[in-house]
Amino acid sequence: MWALWVIAVLFLTVGSVGEGWAEDAIGTRPLLTIARKDLHTILPSDSHILIDPYSIEQFLDALDGNPTDWGLVYGHGHQDPDHDERLFTLNRDRDAKREGKEALQWTVVFLWSADLSRYDPTTGGFSLAIGPIFTPTRWGVVRFKPEEVPSNLVVIPNPSTREVLRRQLDAGRKIGIEIAMVGRLIPDESLVYDFSHDEKGLGIIMPVVRIERVEYLMVR
């Protein structure tokens, strides 16, 4: 009986560690040197790569049909008593009309920017300071939003590149890369319509994506 209990505990422990390793594998990845036009070669064949205004506009066309009239929704801004209600109604109505659209099931790929931060000798990689990329389109400014950013973002260059990057980082140089995030829209509130906090009346559209994979790119 004791032996069976020990085996059961070991089984559960190994299962938990395996899940942790799987989670680590999402965010701990090698640094790839690749041209943007070749990005499709390292991604699932059904991926929709949304990294330029035209491809993003096609994606929004497939989801929501036509751009919103931001001026009408904004009105007189937060001083307008109906401003928040119009924005709420816009999101609610578009969520309802979007149901069942094929594009909701697409595997999508978008980019965030990142700067190398601290070197970790244990992993041989660099932690990252990351942020969204804002893309102006005829729909408004689009900013892709991960439902949850993997907590363990570590990029691991090959040994020769790693030493070059370490010297540059030690010298105070800012080293930027890009993160290709791969996933699918979340089922509820897959697009969020809002206004910029920095520029009055500027419409912001945020596709909210459940992340399944990331790739780190030193773009040529």
Image: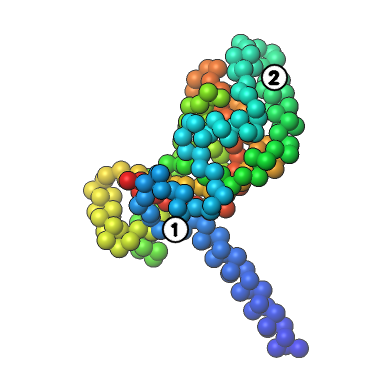
Question: Viewer-proximal residue, 111 or 36?
Answer: 36
- Badge 2: how crowded within 10 Å, few (<14), some, or many (20+)? some
x and y percentages locating residue 166 in the rendered image: 28, 55
Amino acid type, residue under disc 2 in the picture:
Arg
Q: Is residue 149 visible?
A: no
Dot 2 lies on which element? helix
Residue tagged 2: 86
Residue 29 disc label:
1
x and y percentages locating residue 115 in the rendered image: 37, 45
Amino acid type, residue under disc 1 in the picture:
Arg
Quadrant for residue 144, please give it. top right
- Badge 1: how crowded within 10 Å, few (<14), some, or many (20+)? some
Residue 62 disc label:
none
Colouring convention used in this rendered image of the protein: rainbow
Question: Viewer-proximal residue, 131 or 186?
Answer: 186
**Sooner in the amino-acid sequence: mark 2 or mark 1:** 1
The answer to the question of whether label 2 and label 1 lie on touching residues, with beta carbons closer than 8 A, is: no
- Residue at figure coordinates x 69%, y 13% from the top left: 81
On the picture, is 87 further left or further right than 118? Answer: right
Is 220 situated above or below 64? below
